[in-house]
Image: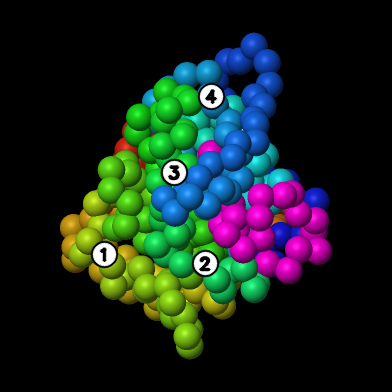
Amino acid sequence: MCYPPGARPPDVPVDLLPPMTGGVGGQDVMLAGADGTRFRAYLAGSSGGDAGVVIAPDVRGLHPFYEELAERFASAGVHAIAFDYFGRTAGTERRTEEFDYMPHVRQTTSTNVFADIAASRAHLEKETKARRTFVLGFCFGGRIAFLSSAAVPGLTGVVGFYGRLGTRENDPWPVPAEEVGRRRASVLGLFGGDDPGIPATDIGAFDDALRAAKVPHYIHTYPGAPHSFFDRTFNDHKAECDDAWRRVIAFMKTGDPAKRA
């Protein structure tokens, strides 16, 4: 589990928030993938700017955490849509905290996930002023974000929070480092230094592969931070979370993955 029940996203640093006349809200939307399958998403439009983000959740799909995260991005001037992976296998209804997600994770395919990202992006760009679109993901979604740089044409950039970089037995998903030759979008990778599931050797190999392929990128590891530091334990890692927000927002506003607001 990437965060406990009731977890909320960390606040955006106040100085990154533009002046506003009121709070930012969002809305449920029903979208259709290329195969006609309906899936649920959550759209939060910003009051201005042309940056947009498609949020790829962790293994639990479209949890309220990611709906609120979309609103956080909108409050910072970035149009956002978070989407669900499991429309084909679990339907479009909201789910309880007891939802058994792993059987549905095992049934996801790259073809369907990237098609659903494309549908989410199309809706985001139709309903808002987003014209420079990013994919951002966490854990399972972090890996999907990294792979989106190669699989989804026309993206400005991708952001992966602690997306797994290695492989496991019977794992159908490609290793991100092996896909760098096909990458079109810039890459920002954010990792915890105390995350045994993503060793420093894997992070280094990914960084080296991106550099060799001349992909614009920036990889940052927070010493001592665990997996899911941005969601499960953000109260214990406020400095790291603030820094991550600064890097992500700067990337989305400027297109430079090495920038920090």
User: Which one is earlier in the sequence, the residue at label 4 or at label 2?
Assistant: 4
Residue 106: % across, % down: 56, 74
User: Which one is earlier in the sequence, the residue at label 3 or at label 2?
Assistant: 2
Residue 213 or 70: which is nearer the viewer? 70
Question: SS class of the residue under badge 3?
Answer: helix
Residue receiving disc 1? 180
Residue 13: % across, % down: 60, 34
Q: Do residues under tags 2 and 1 come within 8 Å of each other at their CB atoms? A: no
Q: Report the Cα–Cα distance between label 3 and label 4.
A: 19 Å
Question: SS class of the residue under badge 1?
Answer: helix
Q: Report the Cα–Cα distance between label 3 and label 2.
A: 16 Å
Q: Report the Cα–Cα distance between label 4 and label 2.
A: 30 Å
* Mark carried by residue 119: 3
- The image shows residue 22, relative to residue 117, as above or below, that is above
Residue shown at the point (60%, 55%) measured from the top left: 87
Determine crowd level at label 2: few under 14, some 14-19, many 20+ residues with C-alpha closer than 10 A: some
Residue 205: image quadrant is bottom left
User: Which one is earlier in the sequence, the residue at label 4 or at label 1?
Assistant: 4
* Mark carried by residue 108: 2
Give the residues in magenta.
81-101
Q: Do residues under tags 3 and 2 come within 8 Å of each other at their CB atoms? A: no
Residue receiving disc 4? 46
The kind of residue on which mark 4 rests is Ser
Residue shown at the point (62%, 68%) measured from the top left: 104
Residue shown at the point (28%, 67%) measured from the top left: 179
Camera-near label (2 vs 1) is: 2
